[in-house]
Image (cartoon, rainbow, N blue to C red):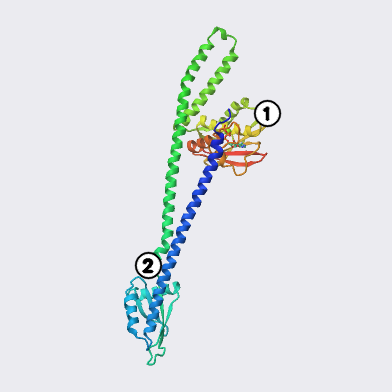
């Protein structure tokens, strides 16, 4: 049967998903970048305003020292407009003595003033005040006005970064929560469907077993053992399918099993069911290796991978299973074919549900395989290597 949903599931779903991800990322970058640019321009404007205030104050101080200037107006500006500002830290340094001459909004502590001055020197260029205090208005001193931007302004310039970090952390937590709930929903669907299938198969299967027993005893069936054998094979096959579904629908029981025997048994079962031009081999250093397995589910995994391999070689070639020790507590099982290979960059995609390149494929085989290995066996599975027209190797790693 050709898969009627193929187009819908495969092409649209994955390309749309990728497009939506890009769209969200680009919108997030535009919003984040825009907010930083906007705040930075605000900060620049405010900074200019603060700088202007200090410049004006320095100028007022300088002017008030000129003999021809009526100092009272400037003193008024200095004392009533700029002076009361309690947000801008200012330090006036005498150029001759290099001592702090005057300070405001920096507190009284000497050490603190010195530290503040060092910061100010590194942050902004000072304004120069030429003091005309001589009897004829000669220059009597040169002072430098150092300043820092207000605390509010400094806070404002870091604000967008803090804000974006908070949003990013929140987004990340929301993403984790969302993907967790999506995964647990998927789990419920898988488990529910599997349970239901096992349940649905159970009833006709038990009556089928009874029917086979009944037919065996019929007079007309005397000498027709071949039919009975075929019927019994089909019943066994149905029982196996039911067992697989019922295992995936419940908490699976893992048992220490001989890996070679399990693989060998499954390959012997598959051999007569695929093209006779496919050779099956098992390689490995030891036939004694054991791993924690759920036999019906692990056989399902092997069957899916081997069938994909057979499909990839159009019915002629070799399937080689290699069993070995990955590490002290891990066993690997490699399944190699010499088929057409997996397209470059698709080695992870093949495990996604709905990914298929076959006319009659559902793209569910490897999604199921990954689930069984990772969720039910706590193991790993990946494409170890794949080359066009040379073949593909899948590696399964199980705990021993
Ligand atoms: N051994 C392999 N060699 C080459 N391509 C492979 C191999 N195994 C899997 N693939 C690719 O991965 C795709 C997904 O495989 P998967 O078993 O999940 O689905 P399917 O075989 O297409 O359909 P079904 O649901 O019937 O198994 C295949 O369509 C194929 O393109
Ligand atoms: Mg398949």
Q: Position of residue 323 (x, y in %)?
A: 59, 36
Q: Residue at x 45, y 43 (%)?
A: 179
Q: Position of residue 1 (x, y in %)?
A: 58, 27
Q: Closest to the observer: 71 or 98?
A: 71
Can residue 287 be seen here? The reply is no
Q: Closest to the observer: 52 or 160?
A: 52
Q: Classify 279 as above or below 155.
A: above
Is residue 87 shown left or right of residue 224?
A: left
Q: Which mark is residue 251?
A: none
Q: Secondary structure at mark 1?
A: loop
Q: Residue at x 43, y 38 (%)?
A: 184
Q: Position of residue 138 (x, y in %)?
A: 41, 90
Measured Cα–Cα span from mark 1 to mark 2: 81 Å
Which residue sits furthest bottom? 135
Looking at marks 1 and 2 on the same chain, the residue that comes earlier in the sequence is marked by 2
Is residue 296 shown left or right of residue 116?
A: right
Can residue 122 be seen here? The reply is yes
Residue 10 appears in which quarter of the rendering? top right
Q: Which mark is residue 277?
A: 1
């Amino acid at each position: 049967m050709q898969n009627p949903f193929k187009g819908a599931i495969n092409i649209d779903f994955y390309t749309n998903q990728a497009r939506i991800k890009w769209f969200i990322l680009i919108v997030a970058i535009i919003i984040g970048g825009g907010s930083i640019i906007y705040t930075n321009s605000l900060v620049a404007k405010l900074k200019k305003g603060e700088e202007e205030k200090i410049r004006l104050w320095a100028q007022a101080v300088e002017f008030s020292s000129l003999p021809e200037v009526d100092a009272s107006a400037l003193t008024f500006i200095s004392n009533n407009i700029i002076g009361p500002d309690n947000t801008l830290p200012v330090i006036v340094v005498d150029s001759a003595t290099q001592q702090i001459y005057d300070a405001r909004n920096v507190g009284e502590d000497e050490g603190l003033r010195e530290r503040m001055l060092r910061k100010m020197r590194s942050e902004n260029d000072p304004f120069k005040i030429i003091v005309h205090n001589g009897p004829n208005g000669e220059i009597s001193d040169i002072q430098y006005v150092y300043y820092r931007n207000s605390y509010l302004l400094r806070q404002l310039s870091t604000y967008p970064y803090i804000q974006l970090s908070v949003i990013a952390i929140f987004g990340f937590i929301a993403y984790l929560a969302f993907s967790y709930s999506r995964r647990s929903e998927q789990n419920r669907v898988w488990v529910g469907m599997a349970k239901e299938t096992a349940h649905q198969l159970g009833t006709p299967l038990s009556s089928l077993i009874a029917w086979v027993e009944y037919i065996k005893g019929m007079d007309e069936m005397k000498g027709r053992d071949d039919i009975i054998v075929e019927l019994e094979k089909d019943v066994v096959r149905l029982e196996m399918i039911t067992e697989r579904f019922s295992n995936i629908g419940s908490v699976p029981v893992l048992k220490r099993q001989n890996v070679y025997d399990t693989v060998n048994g499954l390959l012997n079962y598959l051999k007569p069911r695929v093209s006779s031009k496919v050779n099956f081999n098992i390689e490995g250093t030891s036939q004694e290796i054991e791993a924690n397995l759920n036999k019906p589910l692990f056989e399902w995994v092997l069957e899916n991978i081997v069938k994909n391999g057979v499909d990839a070689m159009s019915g002629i070639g070799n399937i080689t299973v290699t069993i070995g020790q990955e590490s002290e507590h891990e066993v690997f099982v490699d399944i190699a074919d010499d088929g057409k290979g997996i397209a470059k960059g698709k080695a992870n995609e093949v495990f996604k549900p709905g990914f298929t390149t076959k006319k009659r494929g559902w793209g569910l085989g490897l999604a199921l395989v990954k689930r069984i290995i990772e969720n039910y066996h706590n193991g790993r599975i990946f494409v170890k290597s794949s080359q066009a027209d040379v073949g593909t190797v899948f590696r399964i790693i199980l705990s021993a």
